[in-house]
Amino acid sequence: MAQFDLKKATIYLQDGYSEAGEVNNAGGYAQGATTMTIDGIVGAVPTGATFRVTVPGTTDNFYTVTAHTETLGNTTSITFTPGLVAAVVDNDDLTFYGKRLEIKVGEGNLTYDEKRNMEYKKDRGALDTVREGDEEPIDVRLDIQWEWLSSGGADIFPSPEEALKKEGLASSWLSSSSDPCEPYSIDIIISYDPDCSGVDGELITLEDYRWESLNHDLKAGTLATSGKCNRTRAIKERVTI
């Protein structure tokens, strides 16, 4: 297989919404359907949330919620895009994720570093045993194209800087941290599709990212952000795309 090709990777910033439910229709839904009745949801699924349907033997496509209907405060029907790539049946599992912003990397890059501290113990001057020291967060640097730093009146999606800062059209984004007392954080998702028949893709998730610096290059039109994830390891998952 060819080496990883950044041109075949899509990078997203994602907020912290998370929920699980099931298809709720005895007859299921055919390929191409764009509306489903569902159950098992607590509260309202936000417009713009993404979700996956777990259907054995089919692709792991993501869908985006464009509208939703609630019964007694809980979402019982969703409209989404694109249409289903495969038929689903009653009680198929649905996994909902946060709102996503696809970002343009252009000539930029994303790097992340996982680290660990090793403590080497000695016995009378000779190496003896090794213990793992304190945990270290993942270091992340992301260089992306900068079109606008803020959103305008006709925009649907926030700018990358708004998503990082929870401002503007991203002011309603939920933190990816489960602790409401911690500073706002997001997840960075790398979706890699090698575009080769019969070859899996991969999802890499960098959870709970918080920016520590934002560097703006007006001449190059780039925005560079660096910071840390409150995790020691990235989540990696092979998927069929």
Image (cartoon, rainbow, N blue to C red):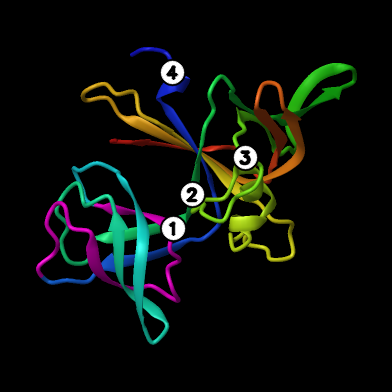
Residue occupied by mark 2: 100
Q: Amino acid at mark 4?
A: Asp
Q: Is residue 35 magenta?
A: yes
Camera-nearest label, 3 or 2: 3
Label 4 sits on a secondary structure element that is loop
Q: Which residue is the extreme one toward the front?
A: 153
Q: Which dot, 3 or 4, sits closer to the camera?
A: 3
Q: For the residues labelled 3 and 2, say whether their Cβ atoms are less than 8 Å apart.
A: no
Nearer-N-terminus badge (3/4): 4
Secondary structure under badge 1? loop
Which residue in the protein does label 3 denote?
148
| Residue 46 can be seen in this image | yes
Label 2 near label 1: C-beta < 8 Å? yes
In space, the residues marked 1 and 4 are separated at their CA atoms by 28 Å
Quadrant in the picture for the C terminus: top left
Main secondary structure along the magenta-highlighted residues? loop
Q: Which of the two discs, 4 and 2, sits closer to the camera?
A: 2
Three-letter code, disc 1:
Gly
* Pair 1/4: label in front: 1
Marked residue nearer the N-terminal end (1 or 2): 1
Determine which residue is flagged by label 4: 5
Whole-percent x, y for residue 189 in the image: 50, 40
At which x and y percent is residue 200? Answer: 30, 29
Q: Residue at (30%, 58%) from the top-left corner?
A: 80
